[in-house]
Image: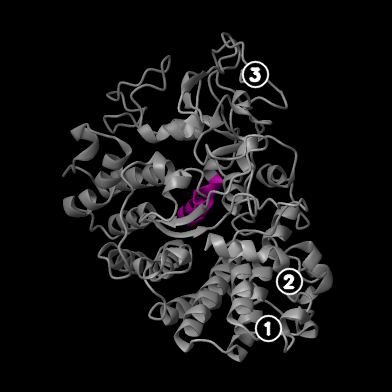
Amino acid sequence: MKKIIFNLTGICCLFLISCNDLEQHPLDRFTDVNFWTSEAKASAVLNQAYCIMGRYPNSTSQIPQYYPIIFDMERLTDNIYFAKGTDPSMVVVGAADAYNQLFSIHWRDCYQGIKACHVFLSNIDRVPMDANKKERMKAEARFLRAYQFFRLTTNFGDIPFFDYEIPLEESLVIGRTPHAEVVKWVRSELNSIVSILPTKQQYAAADNGRITKGAVMGLLAQTYLHANDWANVSATCKKIMDGEYGTYNLLPDYEGVFLPQNQYSTEILLDIAYVDGVRTWDAMRDNIPISQLGRSSEFAPTQDLVEDYVMLNGLPIKDPNSGYNEDNPYVNRDPRMNAIVYHGYKWKKPDGTFVTIEIDPLTSTTVDKYVPNNLFSSPTGYYLRKWYDPTARQSDMASGMNIILIRYADILLMYAEAMIEQNQMNEQVWNATIKKLRERAGFTDPNALDWKASYNQAALREIVRRERRCELAFEGTRLYDLRRWKTAEIVLNGRPRGAKFANNNTEYILATPRTFNKNRDYLWPVPGSERDINPNLGQNPGW
């Protein structure tokens, strides 16, 4: 799949948006009779649809940067404090309106991806090629289109929906289709194409990254998860776990899941392909310690997230029997907390050596030192390690490492949560899900690993929600979890906290207050720029 992206540099410039993102330029160079004459040209259009699954480039440099959408979603949650005065920060403090670019960019990207799929599906039958491969490619395009529609309806609710290439005049008057109808169509598409697509193991290595049966069913499970449809969540995930749609397993090392040498591992159901020197992303440049070639810190983990990582004995830090010491807070903690850089963190450099990161304002003499209201140092006293690519270009942290969208760990967590909500969690399910994830993370204490008959539903719900947060931190799932749990109005209001570095290290850092309006913010607004063109789109409540 990565090889194919090299052929896209001449194609990408053809997908230009017009004023109305529902109907872009006709893309005549794609629909011209002379274009649809070879499999290679058709593949180029399909692969452009794959590219747009991530995001359009956010630069016009020779090697464009594609900012991963998962980081957009994380910046809106309690996992992250985003300090810069840009569009996402306006959203989290409640100051955004319908013209905020965060909303319009996501709307634009999704409809551009849908447009690419419609162009492909409208023309592929004109191409002389193997019939079976053609059907597979159609199924890939249908998945990509369903993925974009699901992303749209999850964020915006009712949306303009069409499963064909609509003309410009129709796009100027189209209304919105109810959320439930869009999701019903997405599920129908996924169930229709799963039998056509290969499993992960049936693809050749050159096709790594293409849509598989497992990706289809993983997305289907997510559609049920977002609806709290627990019976269908558990049934779908169990089939994946049983190997009906390909072989999936946890990678032995948690940290290794997010390293370039393990791309396309058996843990990955769906990801976005990047290529060093061709299609890259550089988000880590503004998240890692300054001493390790970070430019500034604008994506800083919160104390609230740090505190959700349990002790090695499995107990939350607020449990009086946990052994937690507030004066030595980072010892004997969930090993997955190594995703976050704290004072005293042992940072592994690209050459394999380690350096200690010093952040404490009372003792540090390094550039990583916490300084209040500083434009460069971390505003919370924490930096990010997860997603750091040691092979990234050192001058600007441009990385060609893939971004994961769905992985097997999430399947296990979805299954565990669904069984808990149906009051069907037992030792067998626990061992196949929570225990397996904790063992992989590095827990060894039986108190953290073993099933307890005393667990009730409330206790199990707390465990699985904390497990989701820590296992999947910085992977773009947190906001969707808070929405479906209806807890966003609780955790996204108030002041985010940083490390205990305020007032001579006697108090926790308090950041700018967040605001989440439960009567408005569970849905994003229809972008104002779209309503200016088409008033029939209406608007979501409160916007």
* Residue underneath mark 3: 367
* Residue underneath mark 1: 165
Disc 1 + disc 2, Cβ < 8 Å? no
Q: Label 3: few (<14), some or many (≥20) within 10 Å? A: some
Most foreground residue, 329 or 278: 278
Q: Position of residue 356 (x, y in %)?
A: 49, 18
Does 457 sit left or right of 11 as displayed? Answer: left
Asked whether residue 306 is drawn in magenta, I would say no
Residue at 61% x, 79% y: name it: 42
* Of marks 1 and 2, the one in the foreground: 1
Q: Earlier in the sequence, mark 3 or mark 2?
A: 3
Magenta stretch?
A: 476-489
* Of marks 3 and 1, the one in the foreground: 3
What is the number of the mark on residue 152?
none
Q: Earlier in the sequence, mark 3 or mark 1?
A: 1
Element marked by disc 3: loop
Give the residue type that dot 3 points to: Val
* Residue underneath mark 2: 538
Q: Earlier in the sequence, mark 1 or mark 2?
A: 1
- 105 up-or-down from 512: above or below: below
Q: Position of residue 308 (x, y in %)?
A: 42, 35
Give the residue type that dot 2 points to: Gly
User: Would residue 542 be seen by someone viewing this image from the given angle?
Assistant: no
